[in-house]
Image (tube, rainbow, N blue to C red):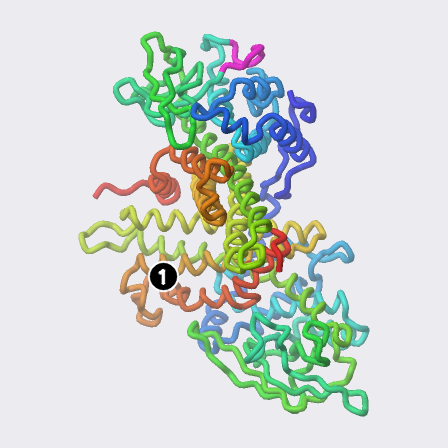
Amino acid sequence: MDLALTADELLLQHEVRSMLEQECGTEVVRGAEPLGFDRRLWDQCSAMGLTSVAIPEVAGGSGSFMDAAVVVDESGRALAPVPLVEHLVTRRLLAHVRSELPFRAGGEEVEPVVSLALLPAIDKMWPLVPAGAVAEYVVGQVQDQYWLDSSTPPPLSANQSSSPLADRAVAGDAQQLDIDPLWWDQALDEWRALTASLLVGLAGRALELGVAYAKEREQFGRPIGAFQTIQHLLADLAVSVDGARLLAGKAAWACEHATPRRRELSYMAFVFAAETAKRVTERVLHVHGGYGMMQEYDIQLYYRRARGWSLVAGDPERQCQELADVLFGTRSAA
Amino acid sequence: MFSSAPARRHSGMDFDDAALERYREDAKRFVDEHVTGEVLSRHAESGTAHDWDLHRAVAASGVIADGLRTNERAGRDPLEIFVLFDELGLAGAPFYGLANTMIVAGIIEEIGSDFHRCAVLPLLRSGTAIVAFGYSEPDAGSDLASCRTRATRTSDGQWRIRGQKMFTSHAEASQFVILLTRTSDARHGGLTVFLVPLDRPGIEIQPMYAMSGERTNILFLSDVEVDDQWRLGEIDGGWDVLKIALAYERGVFGNTNQPVGLSQALLDWARHARLANGDRVLDDPTVRVRLARIAIDSEVTALLGLRAAVIATNGGHPTIEGAAAKLFASEAYVRAAQHCQDITGAAGLLDGSTGCAPGDGTIEHAVRDAPATTIYGGTSEVQRNLIAHLHLGLPR
């Protein structure tokens, strides 16, 4: 047992971080607003193999689910405007039904963006699909069937987190897929686990911004980071980020090995990472004082995305309810 | 594909807990056998967080004698010890005497003299003697460097110790006490540590009882005379000894995950108890959300504690990681105890002896027990200072 990254994972982390530091500074993040998607960066990710991590080899991918967690932790850190989590999870799901796909998953020159509708369709409309405004393919539920929609992405629904969200109609030429409901549930588990890593990356970087600002900003003749009230605030956040990263890692490990605790751990990791990301960004925004609200400062970018990236799954309290169903059994009929 | 990754690599970062589960099975078996009803009721009556029958059983298993494996010595896997204390904590066993004794055995191994190794270590390892900690004083809590218990060199080369120590838990059952004393004026550089037999003339132990029912003590030291051989570490080098002791304490020993047992007790109750409207308590969505959050906190507590233990296993000193684990675990325990009591309503106030307290009174007891965990072994504020300075690099 070793809870630290392996040498291979550290190398992967280093490569992805170097690429994103070079190609995805916050000017790129700002430049991609309001859509929240950068095609050039997507193609670079694809060329580097990041859009096929943890995809089975037969479907044109390689690497483990733990690798995927490492990659999206970095993409969260950089606020990279590329929907890696949705794409990887959906590609893994589609690997089950490769032969039915209208496209050759993997091996394309340019990787098409695929995503999934987290909530079932209402009147043949999937509501606010993550990456729905940019995905060439979306998989989702219509009643108890699964459909693949390949219509032209609708325009963005402009939103607080500058995410490519859009309602997505299930088009007339959508294709029904023979997906086992267990595969679908697994995909949602994997989405929670990887989104947890994404949010941990975001929270970790936001904390770094807070620590750096507290060391540099002076008030009352000393750096504000010398005040215990700021120190204790940041120390608590650091412990939460560490805890969230360990839990996200354990959830990813459970996904990789399909352990019996996969579902509960993915819920736990998602809920804790979401709360941590929201709290860290809000508190670090506060540490920045009035400047934190200003568009020139990066922390507001993190604050808005911490909320948006987690809220696409619905009310966080509902996630806790669903976790309770897994842990304690569903509520008995009154 | 990224250059560093060959097609299929072994899956890295390793949460495989098969080895851990073997340790856990062994620990559970040991606890089932030795943490008996008599042990628990003796603890409840006396408030002494030490039980000789249990302690001798642990010693007989070889755990104390083997100690922790480090880079320098053979011994038990720190993970095994971590799991053992976790299980002892879950069972509500009185293990503080054991934990403190293992810490002192570790310190003696690291910096003890030949005298300590001959006269004390065998007694600790065989389970015939235990050690209490005399760090705190009436005016020295988190600020241990303000220690005023004075050790003065006498003309015949002995030391005369005079002062007062607070919160020297299980001193009434101990043969030795670790004393932090002042030997010169320099704040941190004027402290010296002694390991003193408690049967020396001039030592008086006066009990104090916590709201949890735990007994602790005030130690009065009236010109206690000890030979220089009882000194542990250098003269005026006490601060370094303390740092070793605290690293041991937070790294492997005593990071228990109490909310696991607590929420299990609550769950057993909530499956049958009814609300005023006749609904099962466990079907109340607000109850379910609180229990789910406790479960998440417990998972995080376990992982933070495990991380510290794994670092120790690999030969490192988990100073920051131990502080993070201790801080999160204790704060989460306070939250969990309060949530569990809230959920049970007024019944959660009932004493276990009434026979109708939810969870046989474990929940009510936890509310009285939890606050101490955010204080002893270094307050939450001390841990936050440590994380802020050593981990985040914030200015002092």
Instruction: Decide which of B237, A261 is in the foreground and name it.
Output: B237
> Which residue reaches farthest front?
A221
* For residue B181, above or below residue A209: below
Q: Is residue B6 magenta?
A: no
Residue A128 in percent (x, y) is at 35, 25
Over which residues does the magenta segment extend? Answer: A104-112
Residue drawn at point x = 69 percent, y = 72 percent: B188
Q: Residue A124 falls in which quadrant of the image?
A: top left
Q: Nearer the viewer, residue B264 or A56?
A: A56
Residue that label 1 marks: B359
Q: Is residue A103 left or right of residue B221?
A: left
Residue B221 drawn at (x, y percent): 63, 87
Decide which of A75, A97 is in the foreground and name it: A75
Q: Is residue B295 above or below residue B48?
A: above
**Residue B319, picture quadrant:** bottom right
Helix, strand or loop under label 1: helix
The residue at 59%/81% (across/down) is: B165
Question: Where's the C terminus of chain B, which quadrant?
Answer: bottom right
Q: Dot 1 surroundings within 10 Å: few (below 14), some, or many (20 or more)?
A: many
Left or right, residue A162 beside residue A241: left
Rendered location of residue B78, percent (x, y): 65, 55
